[in-house]
Amino acid sequence: MQRLFLGIAAHILDRRNWIEAGTHPAAWLLWMLVIVTVCVLAARGQGANSVTQVYRQATSAWIEGRSMYPPTEQINGDGWIYPPPTVMVFMPKAIIERGTRAVVAPHLGNERAAAVAIATGDVFWRVVSGMILALSIFRLSRLLCARGHGEWFFMMTLLAIPASLGSMLNGQINVLMAGAIVLGFVGIAERRWGWACVWLTLALVCKPAGVVGVLLAAALWPRQMWRLVPLIALALLLPMSMNAPAYVLSEYQAAAEAISVASRLDTRVFADLGGLLTSLGVFPGGAAMTVLRVAVSLIVLLLCWCALRRLGPVYGAVMTMVLCAAAMLLLSPRTEGNTYVLLGPGVAVLAAMCLLAEPPLKRAIMGYTLVGVAIVLGVAHAISPMLLGSSNDSALRPAGAIVVAACAAILTLVGAGGLPGVRAKHRPLGAGPYGPAPSAATEPRSPAYARS
């Protein structure tokens, strides 16, 4: 028995077993298994905290020309508090639900037809958002692997799934947003500027917190990110193509009021930087938190700039993605535990960099630390009562985000010097730290990048 366990441990610790050809389809199979399981549990009513009902009510109100927002005196921080463009994301789901109900109602009756339509829409939403997240992990792994076949995909899948399970089960928009952010920065790394801007705009449409990714991209790649301006303008004006302009403008006004009132009245402790400080017994005021957020934002911007300078455009974009996700979670004042699906891809890619690229001991230690963070992100809500005496996970997940950001900073500022492939003082900018970066012959270049 002891030999069996030692053999299993040796097999797990051998990096070659994680990147062999057979792990690639296994990763896709694992994603499909997770998505199917989540859909079955949700259909059976196991997703007790599902928010798809909130999305459904908002889209119904939009289609019928009613206000999506409750009266001011009824706002309590729950319910629909997203701006009007967000409802556009749920229109395909609403169309499928209404179409399914129209088709099956003559055969099953209105009540059963409504239940079937809701289940169909919820399954569609979870499958699409889950597959976009899986695709983003695959594209990220393929970007960094030397042969471009995504050899790291299996390990990255194992590390990204724990943080995503809660949001997937609840049907939250965070899953789609996480995939959009990753695909946006992968597009930047591949010089696919148009697609990068499309995905980053989608992340902004999903949630206002997506502005962090938009601002970082605009600050670091200003000559290429001009496409964000017309795309964001289009996203803001798109609702007017589906409803009366006067109604849409009134909904924008109601959204601003709902967000403002919810931020003042909602006294819950969230899983952001303020929630972490509160859990530690520090109670910063509003002005102090504003100063702290500005300072952290400037530090993140500086680290992203250093990553581009030291690691090159490919790995610099990946580090920017990781730091963007961490900043988004720590600085947003209404970050919930399930929102940490945004950090799952960042944890996965950093751990893969540290463990699967012939790591020295110091990077291996960092890699196993990140594996621990990935596990904590998935079980923080369960272990918080045991460790902290509170069911509120406002401490463990923000602490994990800080650890991930610190690992990204260390790899950028300290660890990069001893890694293979990092450009020396006169090495071309395209070199990267974790295996050979794509060459000019194999890496797509747009005319805009060639001129920059």
Image (cartoon, grey):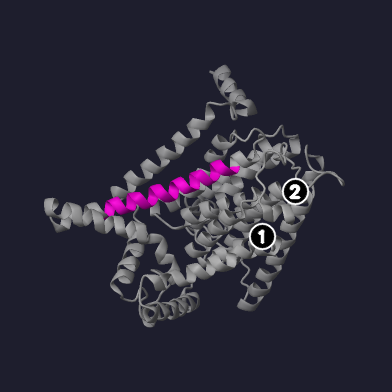
Residue at image position (55%, 47%) is 376
Amino acid type at image mark 2: Gly
Residue at 42% in and 41% down: 34
Whether 123 is among the magenta residues is yes
- Give residue 312's mark: 2
Closer to the N terminus: mark 2 or mark 1? 1
Q: In this orientation, which residue lies closer to the viewer: 347 or 228?
A: 228
Q: CA distance from mark 2 to mark 1?
A: 16 Å
Q: 10 Å neighbourhood of mark 2: few (<14), some, or many (≥20)?
A: many
Q: Secondary structure at mark 1?
A: loop
Q: Is residue 283 visible?
A: yes
Magenta stretch: give its range.
118-140
Left-right relation of 46 to 255: left
**What residue is pinned by disc 1?**
224
- Amino acid type of disc 1? Gln
Question: Closer to us: mark 2 or mark 1?
Answer: 1
